[in-house]
Structure formats: C-alpha cells, structure tokens
Amino acid sequence: MSIKKTNKIFNTFSQKETQKLAGDILADLIKKSPKDMALVFALQGDLGSGKTTFTQGIAKALGIKKRITSPTFVLMKKFKLPTPNYKLLTTDYKLFYHFDCYRLQKPEEILELGFQEIISNPKNIVVIEWPEKIKKFLPKQTVYLKFKFITETQRKIKMSA
C-alpha cells in the first residue's frame, strides 16, 4: 500500500498554527503510510520560511520534550521516541531523525551518515530540511512540503505526497 498522490495547500498565521498543522499532517500520514519503510518528510523553502517550526510540531506530536533546533552544523540529530503514542498510532516507530542538508557540498556526503539505512528502516520518522541537495537519494514515497514566507507571521505550505 502506498500513500495516495495528494496536493494540499495550507495557510498558517503563527508558529503555533504551523506546529499544530505539523502534528495533524503527521497523524494523518501515519495512518496512511506503508509500514515497510520510514516515513520521510522533505521540507523545502527559504531561510525563515517555517521548516524548523514545522519540525518542532512533529517532534512535539511525537512526545519529544527536547528543544528542536535545526542541525545545520551537525547535519543530523537523532531522537528516541519516548513511549508509544497510541493516539497517533506511533507504536511501530522508535526513532525520529532531523536532517539539515544546507551545508552539504555533494549529495553523497549524506550517505556517510547512514542515510540509506535510516530511510529504509520502517521504525523511523525522518524530516529533511533542504532536501533538494539530496533529491536523488530520497525514496519515492517522500512527502514534500514547500514553505513560503508571506508575512512575519503567515506561511503558505504546499504538501505533495
């Protein structure tokens, strides 16, 4: 089973709304996603467009209490999911990975972090900022979200899966 092809556009008017939207999208996709591979989100958009805020919303929905910041200088952060979230049906997921590919010089650099194994593991939820830098390594079922800065508080988010 695969995720149905979908294109949706959302407008958020605060960081809190962007984070809530992230949790709602996560909950919806967990129900629909194939259980034989990781759930992968690719977040595209300019600096300050809401990618990390969206990631914070996913982490919060997963029950992660640690502060989520973009891993621009370390490229990847890994979080163990606390306890299974039965409301979100995350009982099959164990780890949350947050990648930031902004500083990559070559796409192949991502492979040195075990990227292929991470996205192949059905127990992982993966968020990737600046995915265009590693597009050739992303799985077919990746959920793409494009973020656009509208005003200081408003963001337009287009999802395609």
Image (tube, rainbow, N blue to C red):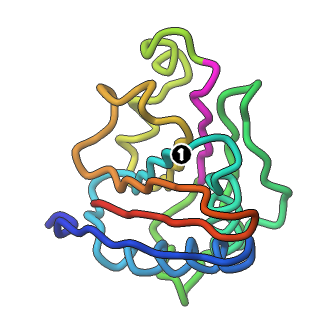
Image height check: is 138 above or below 16? above
117 or 58: nearer the viewer: 58
9 or 23: nearer the viewer: 9
Residue at 45% x, 25% y: name it: 133
Which residue is situated farthest in the front direction here? 151
- Residue bearing the label numbered 1: 45
Magenta span: predominant SS is: strand
- Please identify the quarter of the rendering in which residue 3 is found: bottom left
Residue at 23% x, 69% y: name it: 6
What amino acid type is highlighted by mark number 1? Answer: Gly
- Is 153 left or right of 39, judged from the image as shown? right
Image height check: is 142 above or below 8? above
- Magenta residues span 96-103
- Is 55 left or right of 1, judged from the image as shown? right
Position of the C terminus, as image quadrant, is bottom left
x, y percent for residue 78 = 67, 43
x, y percent for residue 59 = 67, 64
- Is 80 left or right of 37, judged from the image as shown? right
Which residue is situated farthest in the left direction here? 1
- Check if residue 105 falls in the magenta segment: no
Give the structural element (helix, strand or loop) at label 1.
strand
Position of the N terminus, as image quadrant, is bottom left
x, y percent for residue 142 = 32, 50
Residue at 51% x, 66% y: name it: 156
